[in-house]
Image (spheres, helix red, strand yellow):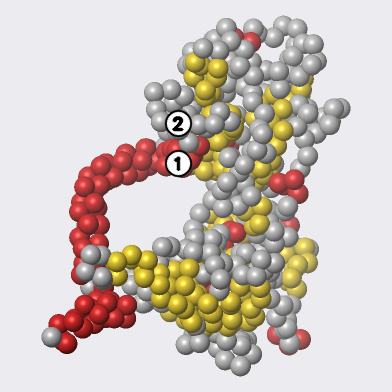
Amino acid sequence: MPTATLAPADFPLVRQAGAAWELYCGDEVLAIADTYAEVVRQLAEMVGVDSAPGSSDGLLAETWMGDPAIAFNEQPDPERDFTNVKWGWRDPALSLVPLMLQTSTEMGHFGAVLAGFIEAFDLTGTGEPTATGRFYDSEAGRQARDLLLGGRRFGVSVDPDSDTAADYLCMEEDEDGFCTAAMWSFTYYSIAGLTMTPFPAFARANIVLGSPAEVEVAPEEAVEAVELDGLAASAPVAVIDRRVRPPRAWFTMPEPEFGDPLLVQQDLAGERWGVPQTITDEGQVFGHLALWGECLRNGSDLCIQPPDSARAYAEFMCGPGVRTAEGELVGTGTMVVGCSHYPTSGVDRSSFSIVRDYYANAGLGWADVRVSSGAFGVWYTGRVRPEVTEAQLSVLQSLPPSGDWSRDPEGAFELCAVLSVNKPGYPVRREAIAAAALPADSLVDGAAVSASVIGRTVMALTGANRVRPCPECAQRHAAAQTATRRDSGQLARIEALLQRIDRRTQHLNGAGIKAAAALLAPTIRD
């Protein structure tokens, strides 16, 4: 890459864009690379340094850690029970305890390659094992590290040592005495290694990136400062998008108090004030989803006000969470764009998960936020996802949020989704209302009824209109439904066949052999 002349204000920066990394100045993208290390190398070349300093010990600078554990004291499936297990492990100071990487689905951990190692084990406050470690400066090590960029997590599975002990329990026998359902109850589990895998036995067992390790650099290996048109800086200087590891304060920002300039007057009487959706240059997003005392703009004579939450919005904030710059995992919910609201009537709304699954398949998640009840209304604050581009942000700036509230079978009315739309049912104005303001109803001309009301009881409500759906999301959702209908019968037949094979091969295990011997004993005596 040729060396460019750069003004101080145009010093190149690094940001993550989806699965790739970009080197950019202002609005211009200078280079695109598959990995962070490659884009930093290009940055170093641009500012006049031959290459970014490589590792001298064969390790990457990043560390990894369990989040929060790599195994749990529970029963992950009907065949394995860890509820009464005692955990142990090989001593990393005496022998290599490897971190393996498996990226394709194969039997067991076949195909896994060495990507790093475990430096230390520990137990969580509930007595479950967790670990920390490093990545090798190798193709597999860099691939494992890259899978965790952007605050992402990846599942891990624990590999047993020969000291592991378990009791075999036959849970069910057929009419011939053969064991048809069994379980291994582990009493001691010694960890010999860890494998990064897409489908771990413990669904919550995973690792994340830790803080970069402190690597000593000899004085002669230190990178000299370079001069950029009078601007002295140590090269390479890479500024990472703060959305990748946002500060915790983005998720704990309190609702502004009365008198704060962020609040905008929403009515002539000055009784309602709110903060319209705000997205900062750094990527923080916050605002009011709905204001107390507001009536849903759906053309109904029934004033449907935004519901409060009796569960601290737990039905919405049930996503995997976001790892903050301080290393804390913060629980969040996802703001979605690009689809219609889930219908309020004529569909199955028997559980919140059904509604959430619809948005997960039909829309695109663009922000991770926490929601709370404030003095003025429903308050949300969080981060824009790192993969969202500048062009997409310019559109999202103008799309206010619209909530989806639903009742569970017990009658609890809770927020379960937030969709970005053109005309929400509870609009929050960006400019203070004036005496010459248009009638409120004119703000939602053409809006469809978005509440399901039985008698005088509201069963579900959403905002009115939507933005243009993304074709990819609609196609993916339709394909998934078609595949489900097509494959359901075949899957049932396969499952029945596997169960039959399992029953007919149970004699190969120890309990089956004992049962067969007991059946044959009278015949042998005769």
Furthest residue in direction right, as rendered: 259
Residue density around tag 1, few if under 14, some if 14–19, many if 20 or more, within 10 Å = few
Residue situated in front as seen by the camera: 359 or 367: 359
Residue at horizontal 51%, vertical 16%? Answer: 453
Residue density around tag 2, few if under 14, some if 14–19, many if 20 or more, within 10 Å = some
Which amino acid does the dot numbered 1 rest on?
Asp
Residue at horizontal 49%, vertical 13%? Answer: 446
Mark 2 lies on residue: 349
The alpha-carbon separation of the residues under discs 2 and 1 comes to 11 Å
Dividing the image into 4 quarters, which one contains the C terminus?
bottom left
Mark 1 lies on residue: 357
Mark earlier in primary sequence (2, 1): 2
Q: Is residue 334 above or below residue 387?
A: above
Numbered circle sitting on residue 405: none
Furthest residue in direction bottom, as rendered: 94
Left or right? Give the position of 454 relative to 89.
left
Give the quadrant of residue 30: bottom right
